[in-house]
Image (cartoon, rainbow, N blue to C red):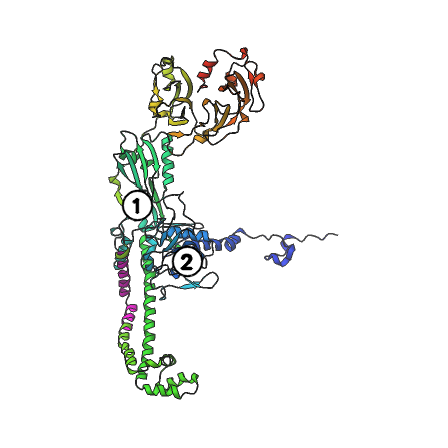
């Protein structure tokens, strides 16, 4: 009989699955226990060991890298390959060479992310203001520590900070670096932990040192008198908002707005932007400006390009004639990342606990920590001098009778008895006896011993001074202030980010944009273009053309749509209909070669409305019987390029352009005359504009492809005669009933002839 199932309430609870061996099922556990036992240790590890900086201003990855470089002798020595540094750092940081190298890049002078870089780099380390400019591989670049790193490691061997074992207990590493200045406020730092983040802006080194010194002298001082505002390595202009700054200084949270700097070059009628906000990139600015231009919201701009080179960052904006550069920049500040906000979140680890602190609280924590470091250093030196004084006191006893000391050593039969006999003979302790016993024979003379003994008085004075320093907090503060003054004097630099006030700048007031309205477009064979409203067209619908000219294409669209004009010189011009004024049917319209600045002798042969998504494709038919299918997305650009060269292949003369939004049948004619009908699905789409295409029509030597048209817009009655299932094909000779005199006019109306 099957065993009766045990009631749920009496079934034993199993907390350890191993008790039941392989037959153990999944044991239920409350979600709160899972979070507490499994997730919380991971979260705290990320917070404490990776993402949040400590009071010395560094994350563990920064500290491990810099300490490794210090131990490699790269503070005073020559540069070495970055790959060598990365490999050595893995003894402390086992998270992979890529992460270590990324850390080095961020700390480097070449990358430019810090006001006071700690890595003196040589080679391509990328740029912080560009998301696309990547650094070279570590085997190509070189690095060493910058001079200011001497302030990070000063007296690190004098017990100023604690040391712990590395991950495999083969060497020691510092838990903090004994920085002589508040690096936590000087170096910009950001990190994302679990459930919290940290975002530090940088402040000017000289201002931070002066502010810290003022705080040590008077904890209630006004910080804004010396700490003017954040300072960024990319420069720019900070828009000073006193209330926002005080909020940051008091709470550690808030934001500041920074804008780019520019100059107007009158001779070339262009604007040069040479400093941008720290929180954006060159590519983000270019993309946003390109969007404005495409949307018709920056009509004053003719072109914008990146001219950054070895001399530094430079974005050039070509202006149209009559544009006010200052007014344009006011608009761009409002609509692009040329003015951006930097959010502050001063989250710092204090004794292993994350805390969001204001500037005054950070200075309080840093000065308390630095005071303890200085006291530990003074105590370390004091202990050394006390030990030396103790040895000299023993040596002074020997001075009373050197011959006795020599006799004791000489008459002692066993070496192990030398020290005890000296201790008994002169009344000294073991440490003093060891010191005396180790004196070289050549130094056992009164001159040497007297010189050593004479140091006793000086040592006693130094020890008394050090003990007084330890017992007097004012003297410790004085030492810290002197070190801060020395750092400010030696390494201080002028501000890079200038300060402007809100009442000094002009704020752009965006004008209400006119809504897009329906328009009719007309393109003539000789390149005249009209944009006419439906109301105007109803009043007078008869189109005026020059003698010998006529209609090539017509469209219905909206007034701000984008349009492309293809020319007979393998070029395409892109613009927006908002660039054209509304006109009437009774005028000739705008002459496109002059309006678009075309090359001499260049003529428009086809116009396309690509739409916002550039859906569909273009079919190019060439004289040699080939056809190319090019997706419209091939003509989509992110920058403001009004003219694209290589719009189609120049290997054979172009005879016709057709646009298809979905596959359909097309009729192709030759000069023999022959005709073939094929489905456009037979042509594979290409993304290369200048593709030569594939053969569609097989031609006899003396004939050529003449034109093409949509099948449903041709007079062909017997369609099955000319239809083919594969290309290339020769087609069939045209019959009289499949051709009409009105065909030429029909093809002209739909833009068939090139």
642 or 558, which lies in front? 642
Main SS, magenta region, reads helix
- The x and y percentages for residue 442 are 33, 81
- State the residue at coordinates (50%, 54%): 36
Q: Quadrant of the C terminus?
A: top left
The residue tagged 1 is 235
Q: Is residue 121 left or right of residue 212?
A: right
Tell me the number on the disc at residue 64.
2
Q: Is residue 27 left or right of residue 280?
A: right
- The x and y percentages for residue 477 are 28, 62
Tag 2: Cα neighbours inside 10 Å, few (<14), some, or many (≥20)?
many
Task: Establish if 379 lies above or below 601.
Answer: below
Q: Separation of disc 2 and disc 1 at Cα?
A: 29 Å
Q: Is residue 285 left or right of residue 749?
A: left
Q: Is residue 351 visible?
A: no
Q: Is 470 part of what is drawn in magenta?
A: yes
Under tag 1, what secondary structure?
A: loop
Q: Is residue 632 left or right of residue 326?
A: right
Please identify the quarter of the rendering in which residue 439 is found.
Answer: bottom left
Magenta stretch? 463-488
Tell me the number on the disc at residue 446.
none
- The x and y percentages for residue 255 are 33, 45
Do the numbered discs 2 and 1 sit on residues whose CB atoms are within 8 Å? no
339 or 473, which lies in front? 339
- The x and y percentages for residue 280 are 36, 42
* Earlier-in-chain disc, 2 versus 1: 2
Q: Is residue 428 visible?
A: yes
Tag 1: Cα neighbours inside 10 Å, few (<14), some, or many (≥20)?
many
Task: Establish if 733 lies above or below 234.
Answer: above
Please identify the quarter of the rendering in which residue 208 is found.
Answer: bottom left
- State the residue at coordinates (32%, 35%): 317
């Amino acid at each position: 009989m099957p065993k009766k199932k045990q009631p749920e309430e009496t079934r034993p609870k199993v907390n350890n699955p191993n008790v039941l061996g392989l037959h153990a099922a999944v044991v239920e556990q409350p979600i709160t226990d899972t979070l507490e036992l499994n997730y919380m240790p991971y979260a705290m590890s990320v917070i404490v060991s990776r993402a949040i900086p400590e009071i010395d201003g560094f994350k563990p990855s920064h500290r491990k890298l810099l300490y490794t470089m210090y131990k490699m002798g790269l503070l005073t020595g020559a540069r070495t390959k970055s790959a060598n540094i990365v490999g050595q750092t893995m003894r402390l940081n086992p998270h992979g060479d890529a992460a270590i190298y990324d850390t080095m890049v961020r700390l480097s002078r070449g990358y430019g992310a810090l006001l006071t870089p700690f890595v003196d780099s040589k080679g391509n380390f990328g740029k912080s203001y560009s998301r696309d400019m990547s650094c070279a591989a570590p085997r190509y670049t070189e690095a060493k520590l910058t001079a200011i790193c001497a302030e990070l490691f000063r007296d690190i061997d004098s017990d100023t900070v604690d040391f712990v074992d590395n991950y495999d207990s083969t060497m020691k590493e510092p838990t903090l670096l004994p920085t002589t200045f508040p690096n936590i406020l000087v170096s910009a730092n950001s990190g994302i932990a679990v459930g919290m983040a940290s975002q530090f802006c940088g402040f000017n080194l000289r201002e931070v040192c002066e502010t810290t010194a003022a705080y040590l002298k008077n904890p209630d001082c006004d910080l804004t008198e010396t700490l003017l505002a954040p300072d960024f390595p990319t420069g720019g202009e900070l828009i000073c908002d006193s209330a926002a700054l005080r909020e940051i200084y008091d709470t550690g949270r808030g934001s500041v707005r920074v804008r780019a700097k520019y100059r107007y070059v009158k001779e070339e009628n262009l604007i040069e932007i040479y400093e941008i906000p720290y929180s954006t990139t060159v590519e983000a600015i270019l993309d946003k400006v390109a969007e404005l231009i495409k949307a018709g919201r920056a009509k004053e701009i003719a072109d914008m390009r990146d001219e950054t080179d070895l001399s530094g960052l430079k974005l050039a904006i070509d202006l149209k004639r009559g544009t006010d550069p200052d007014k344009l920049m006011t608009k761009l500040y409002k609509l692009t990342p040329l003015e951006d906000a930097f959010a502050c979140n001063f989250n710092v680890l204090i004794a292993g606990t994350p805390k969001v602190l204001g500037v005054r609280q950070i200075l309080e924590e840093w000065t308390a920590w630095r005071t303890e470091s200085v006291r530990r250093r003074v105590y370390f030196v004091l202990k050394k001098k006390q030990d030396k004084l103790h040895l000299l006191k023993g040596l002074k006893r020997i001075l009373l009778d050197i011959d006795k000391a020599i006799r004791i050593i000489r008459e002692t039969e066993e070496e192990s008895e030398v020290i005890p006999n000296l201790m008994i003979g002169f009344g000294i302790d073991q440490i003093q006896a060891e010191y005396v016993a180790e004196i070289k024979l050549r130094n056992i003379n009164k001159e040497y011993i007297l010189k050593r003994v004479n140091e006793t008085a000086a040592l006693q004075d130094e020890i008394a001074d050090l003990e007084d320093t330890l017992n007097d907090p004012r003297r410790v503060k004085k030492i810290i202030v002197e070190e801060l003054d020395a750092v400010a004097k030696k390494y201080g630099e002028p501000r890079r980010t200038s300060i402007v006030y809100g009442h000094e700048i002009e704020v752009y007031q965006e004008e209400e944009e006119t809504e897009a309205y329906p328009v009719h477009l007309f393109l003539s064979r000789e390149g005249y273009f009209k944009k006419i409203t439906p109301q105007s067209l109803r009043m007078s619908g008869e189109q005026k053309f020059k003698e010998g000219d006529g209609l090539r294409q017509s469209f219905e669209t909206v007034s701000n749509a984008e349009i492309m004009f293809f020319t007979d010189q393998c070029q395409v011009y892109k613009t927006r209909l908002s660039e054209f004024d509304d006109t009437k049917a009774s005028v000739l319209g705008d002459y496109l070669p002059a309006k678009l600045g075309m090359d001499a002798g260049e003529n428009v042969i086809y116009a396309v409305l690509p739409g916002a998504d550039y859906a569909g494709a273009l079919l190019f038919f060439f004289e040699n019987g080939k056809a190319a299918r090019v997706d419209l997305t091939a003509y989509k650009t992110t920058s403001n390029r009004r003219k694209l060269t290589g719009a189609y292949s120049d290997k054979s003369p172009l005879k016709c352009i057709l646009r298809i939004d979905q596959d359909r049948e097309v009729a192709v004619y030759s000069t023999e005359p022959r005709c073939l009908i094929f489905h456009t699905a037979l042509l594979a789409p290409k993304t290369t504009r200048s593709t030569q295409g594939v053969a569609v029509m097989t031609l006899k030597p003396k004939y050529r492809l003449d034109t093409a048209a949509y099948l449903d817009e041709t007079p062909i009655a017997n369609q099955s005669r000319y239809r083919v299932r594969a290309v290339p094909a020769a087609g069939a000779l045209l019959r009289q009933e499949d051709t009409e005199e009105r065909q030429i006019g029909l093809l002209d109306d739909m833009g068939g002839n090139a």
